[in-house]
Image (cartoon, rainbow, N blue to C red):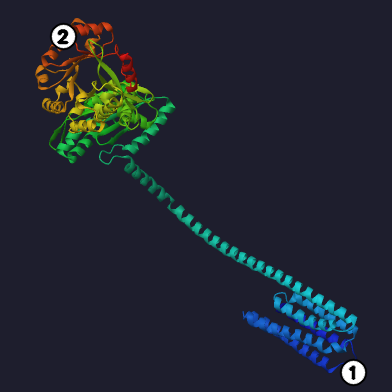
Amino acid sequence: MLYANLNRGAIITMVAFTGLVFGFSDASAIVQSKLVLWSLMIIVSLGRVVDGFYWRSKFSLKSSAKEGFVRFALGNILTGTIWSLYAVLIYQQMDLLELASTMVVLSAMAGGAATILAPSKALSSFYSTMLLVPLSILALIDPTQEYRVLGFLGVAFWLAMLSSTAQSTSFLLQVLSLKERNANLLSDMQRKQTEIEQANEALRQANIQLDDNNTNLEYEVNKRTEELFELSNRDVLTGLLNRTGLKSFLHTALADANENNTTFAILFIDLDGFKKVNDALGHTIGDSVLETMAYRLNKFCKLPGLARWGGDEFILVLEDVTETDALALANSLRAKVSEPMRVQRNNIALDATMGIAMYPAHAEEAHSLIELADFAMYQQKRSQRGAVCVFRHETYQVVRQEESRLEGLSKAIDNRQLSVVYQPIVDANTHSLVSVEALLRWHFNGETISPVVFIPLAEKSGLINALGLWVLEQACIEVQQANINHTHALSVNVSVLQLLDDNFIADIDRVLTSTGFPAKRLHLEITESAFAEDRNAIAQIVAALKDRDIQISIDDFGTGFSSLSQLQLLSFDSIKIDKSFVMSMTSSNQAIVRATLMIAGEFGCRTIAEGVETLEQAHQLQHMGVSHLQGYHFAKPMSVSHLTDWLTQQEK
């Protein structure tokens, strides 16, 4: 850019310099110094013109820009220096007009340089300084007023030129930067366009290739799809639908039934006796049995909705059938399943238990229908194998309620849902308190569950030991802390399962030690049904308890199957007459009570009648010879705090 205006600048410089040298004096009056300076300026200017042509010719050959800048700067410095020498050396010969003219010319040259030399702030500033500052300083120090004014104007213009130079350089640099960015953007656009064209060409070739292979690919995709369906939806062993395939089939069946307003049935089939075959004959025979059974089922019904659910379980979807139709087909299918089969020289006969769930009567979702059919099958298997059962909501609710209660019972102690109440046992003659019976209560989901309901659940689930131990410990703690006469005893019921537990005696010892409750005040009530268990084991446990001064009562006497020989083996202290004989004093029940009293007399033990609700019953039992009474007539089961209040009232 500097060389672009070199020739024009050099010519202007020569013209301006010539005008100043020869314009203000006759040829005869021109001083030698002016001619020398003029000659130097002409030589330098012509040299710069020649250098400009030389640079342009080499620049096309991509020569070094640094080399050209150095030569240009040298020419510029020489030119500025000659101007400065001219001003300094000729100043004394200048009159006011010549000085003013020289100042104007130099200012004009400096102004032009601010634009032409804008690519180099240093050169532009140097050139303006050399042209204006020396002459302006000389004028400022001149004693003539007019000269000083010109000097001041020269300095002011020089400062203005410096500012203009800075602005011009900044603007030029911005322009160059913008130009460079535009050039880069243009280059990027051209490169991107080239890449796009190449990509389009590649895509065109790929499309051609895709079009050529489309037919073959479509065939391969269909083939692979069929293979994947078989792999993911078919059971490897039997070839029937697997769980994934069945769920897909049910999804379609549900949509069809919903659209056509029809019903369908889910038949859940479980083979009876297959586990024994698998365990006795091995898995190879077991797999052959499953293959044979799948073949039978498929041949018998020939329906697409037949699946192996897992193990020895199969599911059959019966579309557009009623419950009656499904039940009839299930019974026919069971007869087919139960036919003997010969597998690798083994004669094998199996049966099947089946459960049926109907859409939409029982459920409207596939997984729910399968669960309900499975539930019906399981309930039928619990009661009688080898039969068909249709799902019933009533049974389902009962079982689910039992499961919910069983789960709640397992957490009842931790959730503080259990409590102990106490029912007094009084002397039949004086009606004074003799002992209290501890009874367990369970509060679950806002209701009080009867012991008749949750005790069997606890026994069936194995929770009875933990619950029984909790009741014993809690009752000992509460009665020990209550204001109750220390002669009064505490009766606690003990399950047969507790008695037969290996740690029972150790648990009794631990509770008595930790609570400080006297063993002689503890009465354990054992139901008569306990005698149907291991008599010798029960006898040893009872003997161990008696060794600790713990008294034993036989609960619910007359409702079990004990015999005199069994009773003779045990050392017991009380017999409790079941409330069923007390609440209805028929002649036969009176005979049972008298027989019980006779047995108690022979063994030298007390009798306690339960369920006494009226004064008449109390008098009658007293006259018959019963020693102790218990029932609502005297007091209902109550908390330990209420028991203390009740005792206070009785003492008054």
Towards the viewer: 555 or 102 = 555
Residue 7: quadrant of the picture: bottom right
Q: Quadrant of residue 304?
A: top left
Q: Which mark is residue 527?
A: none
Taking the spot 47% from the left edge, 56% from the top edge, the residue there is 206
The answer, for residue 346, to whether it is visible in the render is yes
Query: Mark 1 sits on what residue?
Result: 28
* Quadrant placement of the N terminus: bottom right
Determine whether, in the image, residue 293 is placed left or right of residue 225.
left
Q: Residue at x 29, y 37 (%)?
A: 240
State left or right for residue 585 relative to residue 147.
Answer: left
Please name the amino acid that badge 1 sits on.
Ser
Q: Is residue 500 above or below residue 560?
A: below
Secondary structure beneath label 1:
helix
Residue 332 percent location from the top left of the image = 25, 24
In the rendered view, does 433 fall on the left or right side of 229?
Answer: left
Mark 2 vs mark 1, CA separation in Å: 177 Å
- Residue at horizontal 55 percent and vertical 60 percent from the top: 196
Residue 326 picture location, percent across and down = 31, 24
Task: Estimate the x, y position of residue 499 in percent, counting from the top left.
Answer: 18, 28
Instruction: Choose mark 2 or mark 1, whichever is in front.
Output: 2
**Residue 482 or 554: which is nearer the viewer?**
482
- Name the element at disc 2: helix
Is 487 situated above or below 33? above
Q: Residue furthest front?
A: 652
Q: Amino acid at mark 2?
A: Arg
Q: Which residue is mark 2?
A: 594
Instruction: Quarter of the image for the C terminus: give it.
Output: top left
Q: How busy is the neighbourhood of tag 2: few (under 14 within 10 Å), some, or many (20 plus)?
A: some
Residue 116 on image: x %, y % = 74, 76
Whichever of callouts 2 and 1 sits on the residue coming sooner in the sequence is: 1
